[in-house]
Structure formats: C-alpha cells, structure tokens
Image: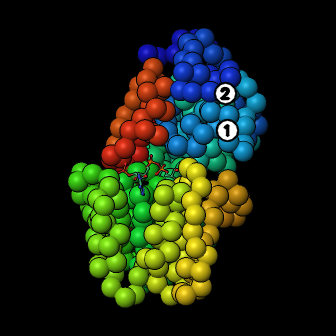
Amino acid sequence: MAATRNVMRAVRVFEFGGPEVLKLQSDVLIPDPKENQVLIKVHACGVNPVETYIRSGNYARKPALPYTPGSDVAGVVESVGEHVTAFKKGDRVFTIATISGGYADYAVAAANKVFPLSDKLDFRQGAAIGVPYFTAYRALFQKGCAKAGESVLVHGASGGVGIAACQIARACGLKVLGTAGTEEGMNMVLRNGADQAFNHREANYIDKIKEYTGMGGVDIIIEMLSNVNLAADLQLLNYRGRVMIVGCRGSIEINPRDTMSKESSIIGVGLFLATEEEKHECATALLDGIEAGWLKPVVGSEYPLEKVAKAHEDIIHGGGARGKMVLLP
Ligand SMILES: NC(=O)c1ccc[n+]([C@@H]2O[C@H](COP(=O)([O-])OP(=O)(O)OC[C@H]3O[C@@H](n4cnc5c(N)ncnc54)[C@H](OP(=O)(O)O)[C@@H]3O)[C@@H](O)[C@H]2O)c1
C-alpha cells in the first residue's frame, strides 16, 4: 500500500520483548532528510538476526524507545537534504545503516551510508548486501587475514552472512567448504562458490570434513554458531588456523590446549566496531564485486511488512536457510 500525504507505515517497538512487540503503524510521519541525509522510498529491507536480539532487550546495545528496526534498505531516493550532491531523486540505492529505521515505507539515512544500487541487482538483492556482506568481508580479511590459496570453512553457509562469505572467498581465490542444514541449502552453497558442502545436521559431518581436508585441516573457519561448534572447529584447523566468531547464542566449554598444538587463534568479529576507513574498504571491495558480477546476493524468504513478527520468529527458529531473509513494504 502506498503511503498517503506525509504519513507512512512503519514498524514501531515501544517496549523490548518477543516478536509481538513489533507493531505496524500506518500513521507514522515520513521523516525529513536533514543536512547530509537521504530519504529513501523502501522497496526491500533485510532482516538480520541481531535485530531480534536488540528487540528482545537482552543485547548490549539498546536503542531509545520507541524505535523502528532495520538497517539494510534498498529503494529509490525520494529527496535529499542540504549538501547532498552524490544522490538525487529517483536514484536506485542501498544502505548499510538508517537513522529512522528500515522496516518502513520510507527511511532516512546518512548520505555516507548510502551506495548506488547497480542495475545488475534487484531491490531484494540490494537489501541483502549491508550487514551480511560487510560482516563476511570483515571476518575474512580485516580480522581473519585471509589470503588467496588458503582454505575456508563457512560453518553455516546457507544464510545471509554465509552465502556472502562463500562468494567473497571464492572470488578472492580461497578454497571454500560450506555447511548447511538441508539438501537444498547445501546445493545453494555449492552454487555460490563452495567446492564442497556438508550437512551440519548429520551426526558424523565433522568426521566427513576431517576426511575431506586430510591431515592439513582448514586455514580459516567463519563460524555462525560458535556456542555449538567451537570445540569441534579447533579440531578442524590447520597449523596457525583461525576461527572467526561471527555468530554466538550462548556459552560452550573448550579445551584451551587444543589451540596450543597448532597455534590456533579464536578471533571475535564485531561489524559495529569497524572504523569508517574499514567500512570504506569493505564498500569499495563489494561495489567492485557487484560490477565484476561475482557478488550476487541470494534472497531466500520474503515477508510483507505485516508479517514482521513471523519473520523475527522464523529467522531464529525456522532453520533451513535459503539465503537472505527480506521484508517487502
Ligand atoms: N559478529 C557480527 O558482527 C555479526 C554480523 C552479522 C551476523 N552475525 C551473526 O551471525 C549469525 C549468522 O547471521 P546470518 O545473517 O547469516 O543468519 P541467517 O541468515 O539466519 O543464517 C543462519 C545460518 O546459521 C546456520 N546454522 C544453523 N545451525 C547451525 C549449526 N549447528 N552449525 C552451523 N551453522 C548453523 C543456518 O543453516 P541452516 O538454516 O541451513 O541450518 C544458516 O546458514 C547470526 O548469529 C548473527 O547474529 C554477527
């Protein structure tokens, strides 16, 4: 439904809690872009797991209430604030952060967090770039120091960050192994850059990975569920291997001795800690990837804005990811 006059639909959170605290309202004022800001007509917005943690109120970073979630918007520029010269009304764009929130008909973003959306990608794909691709790039190169010729296991390769990691790693000359929880997910991982796929729901899949890598093991693991997999990951690493902690939903016991035998490293990844220079480096590499044609986000489930609570339920409890989840206003 199109917004009328100066009001729009937006999802508002008035209190922290379960998915039911996401309230779709239809009388929210369309924000005005201020100096160095861009107002975007939202065509799609990525749903990221972190938005569910923040909504629950159990996350380290809490926005002031009420707020509208959503950072990864793709759409068309509606208007621009003073001093914005890089964009004009009608431009196709995507964002990596919004000021007013992306789960809405319109969103305001700082112009330096907005990028042109290539004609090669549709809006749903544009909404799948932000958090997933920037995180995957940061994990691989800025924190993991990945090099061409090394091997990477994307442990949880079928979701937003996983597919991004497979595509980036493949394009940069790494050998890629990926895991998924379904046959469909494994096939998608193989189509998106992995040389080999494994099913993380099979009881003996860790043995299968060991058998595949032989004595050497993998140089890097991009880990999406470290509270389940970290102890096993340490068994899968090569000498001087690195486990990159991207996803974690609890605690796990490991034997620190397992890091000594191969001088392995366990490294945390926090996209929100990236400096402006690091974000710029990510953006440059990823925009090059879009132009070169290897960066092609895979969109899995799509939800209308009305079904936002279901989307938040499913991204945590659904299982069987098929790429990136997006909301469509
Ligand atoms: N540190 C950061 O800065 C940062 C940034 C972005 C995301 N994250 C975190 O990274 C994680 C992934 O994000 P996402 O956007 O890719 O989520 P997503 O799209 O929901 O994907 C979740 C992935 O985890 C996989 N998974 C499920 N069970 C697994 C298991 N036992 N072992 C390994 N993988 C398993 C899923 O596979 P199946 O569904 O096929 O089973 C799927 O590939 C989330 O926890 C998110 O919060 C962290």
Looking at the rendered structure, the secondary structure element under dot 1 is loop
Residue 70's place in the image compared with 31, above or below, is: below
Q: Is there CB contact under 8 Å for labels 2 and 1? A: yes
Q: Residues within 10 Å of mark 2 (few under 14, many from 20)?
A: many
Does residue 105 appear to the left or right of 270 in the view shown? left
Residue 61 at x, y percent in the picture = 72, 43
Residue 155 at x, y percent in the picture = 42, 63
| Residue 1 disc label | none
Q: Nearer the viewer, residue 203 or 168?
A: 203
The quadrant in which residue 211 appears is bottom left
| Residue 16 disc label | 2
The residue at which mark 1 appears reads as 58
Placement of the N terminus among the 4 image quadrants: top left
Q: Nearer the viewer, residue 145 or 130?
A: 145
User: Measuring 58% from the left and 51% from the top, which residue is drawn there?
Assistant: 250
Q: Ligand 1 closer than 8 Å to the CB at disc 1?
A: no
Residue 56 at x, y percent in the picture = 62, 33
